[in-house]
Amino acid sequence: MKDVFTIDVQRAKDIIASPDIIPVTFRGNAIHLDKVFETNGYVEGHYEDGTVINVPVQDLKEH
């Protein structure tokens, strides 16, 4: 079983900048991170189907 980690703003920025695919979920659903809003601690991301969402960075999980 893989470890699951809560993400902070810096880690979200690192994930976006990474050339590797790093699995991230929001409420159990895979999400791709697109942009970090440092001032309010939110990230913009999208689901596999293209739906764009803005969520608090602390609600994301790295697998």
Image (cartoon, rainbow, N blue to C red):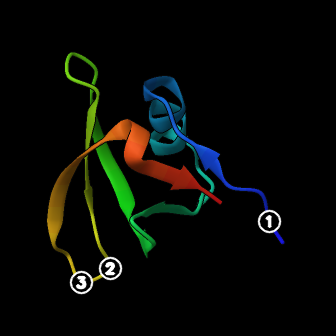
Whole-angstrom CA distance, mark 2 to mark 3, is: 4 Å
Instruction: Check contact, mark 2 vs mark 3: CB within 8 A.
Output: yes
Whole-angstrom CA distance, mark 1 to mark 3, is: 25 Å
Q: Nearer the viewer, residue 31 or 29?
A: 29
- Please give the residue where the numbered disc 3 appears in the rendered image: 49
**58 left or right of 46 in image:** right
**Amino acid at the residue labelled 3:** Asp
**4 left or right of 23 in image:** right
- Quadrant where the N terminus is found in the figure: bottom right
Camera-side mark, 1 or 3? 1
**Amino acid at the residue labelled 1:** Lys
**50 left or right of 22 in image:** left
**Amino acid at the residue labelled 2:** Glu
Which sits earlier in the primary sequence, circle 1 or circle 2?
Answer: 1
Q: Quadrant of residue 4?
A: bottom right
- Residue density around tag 3, few if under 14, some if 14–19, many if 20 or more, within 10 Å: few
Instruction: Check contact, mark 1 vs mark 2: CB within 8 A.
Output: no
Disc ID at residue 2: 1
Point 53% across, 43% down: residue: 15
Whole-angstrom CA distance, mark 1 to mark 2, is: 22 Å
Count how many numbered circles sit on residues in the image: 3
Point 49% across, 24% down: residue: 10
Point 24% across, 47% down: residue: 55
